[in-house]
Structure formats: structure tokens, C-alpha cells
Image: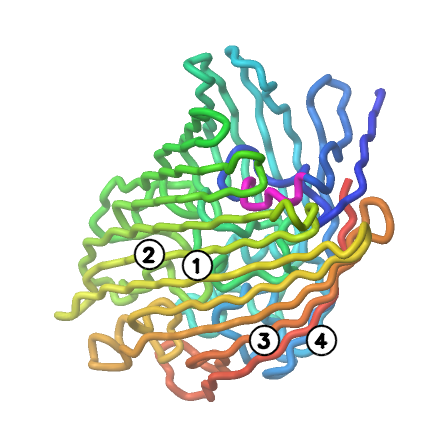
Amino acid sequence: MKKKIQITIALFVAITGVVFADSAPEASAQDTKKMVQNNFVETAQKGIKLSGYVDTGYSYNFTGTSQGASTVNGRFGSDTAQRGDFNLYAVKIALEKAMSSENKAQAGFRADVMIGEDATYFVNRTSPQTAVNGGPTNTDMNSNTLFLEQAYASIRAPVGNGWDFKVGKFVSILGYEVMERPANMNTTFGLIFNQLPLYYTGVLSSYKFDEYIDGKLGVVNGSNSDNNTTTNPNDADGCALLAALNFTAPGGNANWSNNFQYSTGYDNNTATGTGNSSEGYNNNGGSVSAYTWYYNSWGNWAPKFANDKLLLAFNTVWFVKTGNTTGPTTVNSSVYGAGAYAKYQFNDWFSLASRGEYLGSNNDLKFGTQGNPSTSLNNGGHVTGTNLWEYTLTAGFNVIDNLLLRAEYRMDWGSNTVSNGHVAGNNSGAVSGGPAYYAGAEVVYSF
């Protein structure tokens, strides 16, 4: 078997060859295309490429206990392990036969598999302390979990400029950050990332009107679900509708992406701090008639005066979920957030990146820091909104080809930020507003 290895020195982060093809998050990591343009192993069959990375690290949280009794609301599961923790974040493998740029009838495929601690939480992001049906805790973390990130067939119809389709399982079109940590500016995942869908199963079409505007339309089962969206008791054959409109500036140094999702039923978006579904409302078996809609806008800009050394970006989200829980209370939850990013590449081997975010809600249902959300509202309990903030500073080092080293500091604060020993439906246990401090290091080898 003849193998061909092509490697390019990374300028920002180290794994663009792994980032998802033709979805909004791919463009959100636009800066990484300058890092590893052709990083792959070509298989015996021409055109099929194998790529991936190994991502490991060490994290230390300065709150809580080593037994995992504390969590920091808004943080991704792998980032909440208390005290010192060595991490195998992920071993990522992607196999792909990409379509060419020719506007002709053609087909291809892509399959991405992830193994590690991140995979454990991608399968079930539910927070162990605040959720009604909790996910993995710090004491039973498993780096052997297998997560099929995406697997789809790609098809191009020679209509107009070329109309592309993905059929199968593919990553979310929402959000600036992606599931691959090394493709993001920071090691830890942001507050907004934690509230957005991860993947869908269905059909997604994309069309490039010209070099400045492209769009997407799709129909899927729902967020994070291989089955239809039927987590409500009405047995509705639910689905989710997707749409995106993206703008690229002349010169290609700026992007603005607008992404929409509308779900006809309860979405299975098991984000941190929720129960069985993203709603987390129907925990007592009441009647439900619900919908969920998202609007996400992100953009990035690499000023020409900075000679590709500076990258600025923003990420925003607004989503609304509504439903009827047990009892007379109609539950409506609105969540909103914004984040700003900046990264400066001082030279070929050193960069510094920062991120600041805010996430808020009109009530406590999304984060569950005051007990069982469905019972607390029905019983006249806590309905005050939650406000979370975080700031992250990350230093990156590309001292050897294909090897990325990063060191990170993070601080989270806000209302009810740190939950110590808190269990859903039980108001015992300390809840504080932080700040909660984090320090970590990351080592990534890409191939």
C-alpha cells in the first residue's frame, strides 16, 4: 500500500483537516485553514483520506473537592473535574472522500469518530449535579467512550453553481466553536457552546450563490438525536428545520454567519444543567405542547493591516423554549448570550488568545441551580433568571511540526455559578456566585 503524507506547519491551531466539511462551524474555524491545509494520510483507494489527532492535557479547578461534589454551571463536563486531573480529551479519526470543485454530478462521504473523555460528555452532556437524570461524574469518567460525531454521504447536483447535499449524521450548523478543541481559540469550551446542539440526523443542502453569499436548508430529526423528536408525551412525529445565510467579505478576510433552527417538539439537547431534554420541564409526566427555536450569529475578521497576525470574532445566541408542565404553570424559557474572541500570532510558534462571554436567562429552568425546575415553578419556587460570565486566556506554542502545546487560565462568575453537593429537587448544599478559577495545559498531535 502506497501512503502519502502531506504536512504543513500550523500558524494558529493544529487541525483544520479534521474540521467538519461544509457546515457553519467549519467556516467558524476559518483561521485554522491557514494552519494545516493538507494534513492527511492517503489510503490505497485514491482520493480517500485519513486524518485526526490525539488531544491530551491536565486541568486543575480551584473550587470544590476531589470527589466531584462540585460543578461550575456553564462549563463543559470534562472541564469541571475538581482539583487536579489528567485528561485524555479525545482521539479523533476522520475518513473522507471529498468532492472536487467541479460543477458536475458527483458524490463522496465523510465519517468522524471520537474516543475519550469528551466523547463521554458528547454522548450525554447532562450535568451530574443539577440534572434530574444526571450524566457522568468526575469519579466515573470514562476515556473509552466511542462517539460517532458524523457519518454522511455527500452529493452534488449540477444545478446553477452546484447544489450540494449531506444525507446522514452531521454536525450542528450553529455556533462559532466546534467539538474539536484544537480547532477553537481556547482549550475549554465556552458558555454558548454548551447550550447549542451538537449534531443532527437528516438532510442538509447548501448552495453558493456567488463568492460572497452562500446558504443552507435542512430537515432533521432534532438536536442530538438519531431518532425523531418525540421526547414529549404527545407522540408527535417531530422534526427540526435548519437554515443558514453566510456572507464573506471581498478579499476573504471576514465572515458573517446567521443560523436558524426551529424544532416542532422537545429537542434532545442534553446541555449542561438540564434533564432528559433541553427543556428539562416535563419531569413529572405532565402534558406538553412545545417548540424550540434558535438564532445564532457569529463573525470573524482578520484585519489586513495586521498581516494575518490578528483575528477578531464574536458569537451570539438567542433561543426560546416553551411548554406546559404538571400543574397550572406554563413554562417559557428564553436564553441569550454573547461572546468576544481575539487572537494574536506573535510569530510562527507563539500566539495568545482570549475569550469573554455572558450567558443569561429569564428564569432558572435552563441551569437548574435552585432545585428541580418543573416542581419548583409549579410550587411557587425560584423563578429568578441566571447570569453567567467567563473570561479565558490561552497561550499557544507550535514548536514542532504537527505538535500544539497550550496553557490556559479561566475564571467563571455570576449568579449561582458554583454548586457544591447540589442535587436536583434538593435545595441543600452551598451555591455561590464564584469566582471559580481554572488552570490547564493541553498537548495535541495531529496527523
User: Which class describes the residues within 10 Å of circle 2: few (<14), some (14-19), or many (20+)?
Assistant: many
Type of the residue with mark 3: Met
Q: Which residues are magenta?
A: 26-33
Q: CA distance from mark 2 to mark 4?
A: 35 Å
Q: Is residue 442 visible?
A: no
Image position of 363 (left or right of 147): left
The residue tagged 2 is 319
Q: CA distance from mark 4 to mark 3?
A: 16 Å
Type of the residue with mark 4: Gly
Which disc number belongs to residue 9? none
Dot 1 or dot 2: first in sequence order is 1
The residue tagged 1 is 195
The residue tagged 4 is 84
Q: Main secondary structure of the magenta part?
A: helix
Dot 2 or dot 4: first in sequence order is 4
Colouring convention used in this rendered image of the protein: rainbow
Dot 3 or dot 1: first in sequence order is 1
Q: CA distance from mark 3 to mark 2?
A: 25 Å
- Residue at the extreme left of the image, as rendered: 328
Along the viewing direction, whichever of 264 and 252 lies nearer the viewer: 252
Type of the residue with mark 1: Gln
Residue 325: quadrant of the picture: bottom left
Q: Callout 3: helix, strand or loop? A: strand
Q: CA distance from mark 4 to mark 1?
A: 26 Å
At 59% from the left and 30% from the top, the residue drawn is 110
Dot 3 or dot 2: first in sequence order is 2
Type of the residue with mark 2: Phe
